[in-house]
Each structure stands twice: as structure tokens, then as C-alpha cells.
Amino acid sequence: MTAHGADVPDGDGQAAAGQGAASEAEAPSGDQAIEVPAARDRARAIPEAAVARLAVYLRALTSLADQGVSTVSSEELANAAGVNSAKLRKDLSYIGSYGTRGVGYEVEVLIGQIERTLGLTRKHSVAVVGIGNLGHALANYGGFPSRGFPVSALFDLDEDLVGVPVGGIPVSHVDDIVEVCTDREVTIGVIATPAKGAQEICDRLVAGGVQCILNFAPVALQVPDGVEVRKVDLAVEMQILSFHVARRQQDATAPPDVDGADVGPPGPNGRGPDGGGQQTGDETESANRMVERL
Amino acid sequence: MTAHGADVPDGDGQAAAGQGAASEAEAPSGDQAIEVPAARDRARAIPEAAVARLAVYLRALTSLADQGVSTVSSEELANAAGVNSAKLRKDLSYIGSYGTRGVGYEVEVLIGQIERTLGLTRKHSVAVVGIGNLGHALANYGGFPSRGFPVSALFDLDEDLVGVPVGGIPVSHVDDIVEVCTDREVTIGVIATPAKGAQEICDRLVAGGVQCILNFAPVALQVPDGVEVRKVDLAVEMQILSFHVARRQQDATAPPDVDGADVGPPGPNGRGPDGGGQQTGDETESANRMVERL
DNA sequence: TAATGTGAAGTCGTTCACAGCA
DNA sequence: TGCTGTGAACGACTTCACATTA
């Protein structure tokens, strides 16, 4: 984990498979012999995939609580979360036994336990870097502050934006990242800049004491051990969907295809798709400069 | 990642997260005996996780192409994409043998092959529903159109927004989803609405012929077989990061913890964390109504 | 009786290591 | 000689199925 390579987008939550998070280059050096056990104990025992789902269960639970429900069975909760009950029970078993056989789980108790496990009993200050289209949306995002993630700093490279309040917080200049993050004890940094400067921003955040980064820029960030990176890439999500559309059509048009040569000639042909390609923007590329001020 | 993976995140997938997509209720009835082989052949052989990474490789490759690089070794490309070379080679092997032993891969050729595999040789019309903060950002998102995903329809429930052009496209009313999506042959729908109406929107998109959905609303959507859903949940991503912060601190404060009772008393205590909780917004909840017009 | 909690089996994905080829 | 392509070993996550308990 923690590894450098921002783990690939992996399928996360969603049903089947997916996951396979981080654990990239694990510093395979012959430093210490084993180090497998001990160290990581309590929390490390929970599979990454299960952690992701716990957050989903939490949401379903708070929703139930709002509706006045006080008890749920694994079946009901699993249904609300979009997983099967066996998986849900297994996941919950990682954090302890808080259910009652023959009855189910007490909603409030489970909420408390999951929040504790996810470390939500502590507030995590968030900094958003890159106040473009996306950064703007994130800064105004109601879901963050309401869930214990107060946005306490905004940064942009654009001098015209500095000082302008967005979502109630004045934008600071990226040159002050280290200082401001240290001051405000930012623990989570969100990078919503173009790919170009993302690594530089990342380095500054780390220098400012940020331990976790949510990266929207389309690059694999390099970070020192001990810093966690999660990447969200909209273009990748779209392309995965595209793949499924393609697969579906292939299945539909040629179901009894045994093996033979597939679609195009595997020969050494230049590109293939539309004209000279070109791939203009670089994802968040334009985003950063499009909305500009409110 | 379906997403699922989106979900979650995924693991994810994101990072991980993210992902494994649909295939929720798989109709486990004793309908047909096996059905394992045949049917899904060419494309289905590629693991979901590998598909997600192919999209990442594609980006790295186009970046290299822009820099004028014409050949890469698996080692170099893997490095740029943030994975290890063995995994990269395995992933590429799923789509065929386009490398040259002793040399590496031709950038242009690989780009073409990956694009073909991901179905990017065809344009996929995108519809964005919910023109709030996030929807706004998505509508203006440069990364979509430039990568073969032209945004061709926008929808919102707000009458005041209908007709207003966002990113060059006039917003339509959600009541017209079915009609407009059918007309414009939308293949991918993006839901950026509050959790509340998401399922309803989803149903309409499906009725309008949309086969793939990227869901930003914090709910597990129910879709018929044949429709693919990937979920992206920012709050979940943040909570996963929060978990890692918590784990890190736990490791730091009490490394030689053997087992005993963990943190809080597992007894039947009410909630636990901050006061009466409350969980205000519902993620995109506020988003939808915050920026309003440009 | 009903539903949790969990070992065990199964499935899927990653890593290893090396044969094979330019 | 150098790097790809891939079978096989390994490890992680999921599903099954049932003992267990309120």
C-alpha cells in the first residue's frame, strides 16, 4: 500500500471483482527480513476492498437512520448498498461482532463502529488545489464538510483568483501551499489541476505535511512511502464504459465467433481510429481555466 | 473500478478503486446449465482490472507520442503508468502481441490497438443529467469531447436552467430524457444529481436507450441486465483516505498492540463520534442547486 | 426460528521466472 | 543480448454453507 504508484482506478465498490488496489512497488529491497506480521495489526487486517464498501454501508445506514429505522438485517442492508449479504456480513465481521443473531444490526451502533473504523471521529482538513471547473465544484461540494471533511484551504496558480472567496474560503496562491497546509493542519489534499503541474503540487502538499491525496489529474504521482494516493480519472471511467459498449455490440453481431482473426488486420498499420488523433486537452487541462471566477 | 467497483472507487480502483461493475443480481436461477464458455469470447477474456489499466496506458502512450517518442519498452511504459512491467506486459498480452522482442512496442501501433479494444474508434454521445456544480464542471470538461466522448445532451429539473446553454449545449428538461436520448443516440449517461431522484433519472436514461451509466449520485442504482453502471463517489474516496490516516496514527501510537480490547468499549453505546451526527447534504445534494447558472 | 459470524472452497488477479524470438 | 510473452505459483477477495446463538 501507500506505495508510490497512485493505484490504478480499479473498479472499487461496484459489484463484481474490481479492486486490486495499490501494493505497487513494495520496496523489494533486502532491507528487513519479513516484517509481514505484527506492525500492521488492528486496521491492516481489513482488506482494502472491504474498507471501500464500509463507506458505502455507512451511507446506506445513515440514510436508514434518517428514515427512522433502528434495526436492519444483513439482507436488507446489503440490498440497500448493492452487494450480497454474505459479503456484507464478512465485511462487518472485520470490524467486530456488533449484530444480534436472529435479529440483525442496530443501525446506530453500526454507524458508530464504522465511523470509528474509518477514522471519521476526527475531522480531516481538506485542501483543494486548482480552482478550475472541477476545483470549483469540489470547493462548493456539500458532501465534504457535512461528513467531517471541512475544506480549509484552496489554491490556484492564477493571481487573479487569489483572494477571491470560493465557497466561503479565499483562494491562496500555490506558492504558499507548504506554509498554509502546515498552518491549517491539512491532512487530505485534493489535486484538481491539469496533468502538467500535478507532480509539483503533490510534492508541495507532501512537504506541507499532507499524508493523503485524492488525485484528479491524469498522471501517476510519485510520492514517498507513507503517503497514500487515490486517483479518480473521469476519462478512464468513460473508456471503461466504452469498452463494455463495444463488447456488447461484438457479442451481438458475431456471437458464434470461434477464434480467427478479430476485427482489424493486426498488421503494422498506423494509428487506426479517427484521423490524426490529436488528443487535445489533458483532462482537467482546460477545466482549470474555463470557469474562472464564480 | 465498476465500477464498481466504482464503485466504490473501487478500489478499488480506484485507486483503487473502484471498481467491478454491474452484474448485480445475476439471476442465479437454474435456467441454463453452464453457459460459461462460448458466448463471451474475444473481449470478455480481458479482466476488468486490466481494462481499467489499458485506459491508463493509453494516456501515457499519447503523452509519449506527443513528445515524439516512437518506441517504448514495457519497463518505461509501466513506469509512466505507475504499474510494474510484468503487469503491463500481461495486460497487453490480452489484446494481442504487438511488441517486438528485444526492442519494445511501437507507440503508434499500441495506441491504435488499445483504442480499438476499448471501442474508441466509435464516438460515444454523452448526456449529463443534473447541471449543478458537478454537472456544470462535467459539461465544460475538456477531456470528454477531445477523447471521443462528445457531450450531446444536458438535462436538469430546474425550469430556469432549461434552454440555457452550458458549454455550448442548451439544457433540456429531465422530462424529455427518453426522447432526446433516443434522438441523439446517447450511449453513455452521466448522473450528477442528488441521490433522491437518481433512480428515476436512471430509469429514463435506460428507457432512452442508454447502455452505460456513470453515476455520481450516492445510491446503488438498479438497472436491467445489459446495462453497465460505474459509480464514482467522492465521499467514499475521502473516507478511504481517512481510514489510512487513522491506521497510520494507530500504528504510530501503539505499535506493540497485541490484541486486547481496541479503542472504545464495544458495549451498546449510542452513536459515538461528534454530537448527534446529522449528515446534512446528500453529496451531490447541494451541488445541484448551488452554482445555478453560470 | 431466524439471522449472524466464519472456516473452507472457489474465483480472480498479480507476481514470478523463464522460454522464445528479434 | 535484451526484452517480450506467458505458464505456473502465489496471494487476495468472494462465495458457500453451516455451526452458533439470541
Image (cartoon, coloured by chain):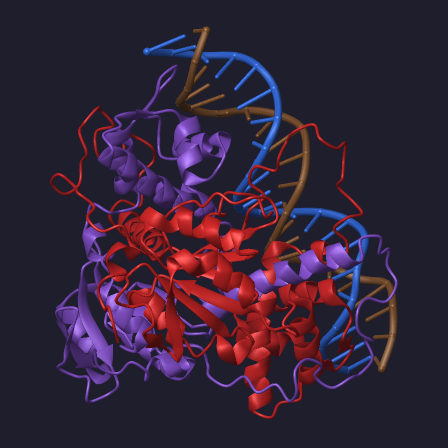
Chain colours: A red, B purple, C blue, D brown
Is B155 or A23 nearer to us in this picture? A23
User: From what the image shows, is residue B111 above or below residue C22?
Assistant: below
Query: Is residue A48 visible from the viewing direction of this image?
Result: yes
Left or right for A142, reference A283: right
Relative to B256, does residue B64 appear above or below in the rendering? above
Task: Identify whether B47 is placed above or below B76.
Answer: below
The residue at the point 19 percent across, 89 percent down is B160
For the point 33% across and 83% down, which residue is it?
A: B290
Residue A166 on image: x %, y %: 35, 76
Give left or right: position of B5 versus B68.
right
In percent of width and height, residue A97 lies at 78, 71
Q: Tell me: A281 left or right of A122.
A: left
Q: Could you tell me if residue B232 is visible in this image?
A: no
Q: Quadrant of residue B253?
A: bottom right
Q: Give B77 or A263, whichever is nearer the viewer.
A: B77
> Percent position (x, y) of residue A259?
33, 32
**In the picture, which quadrant includes the C terminus of chain A?**
bottom left
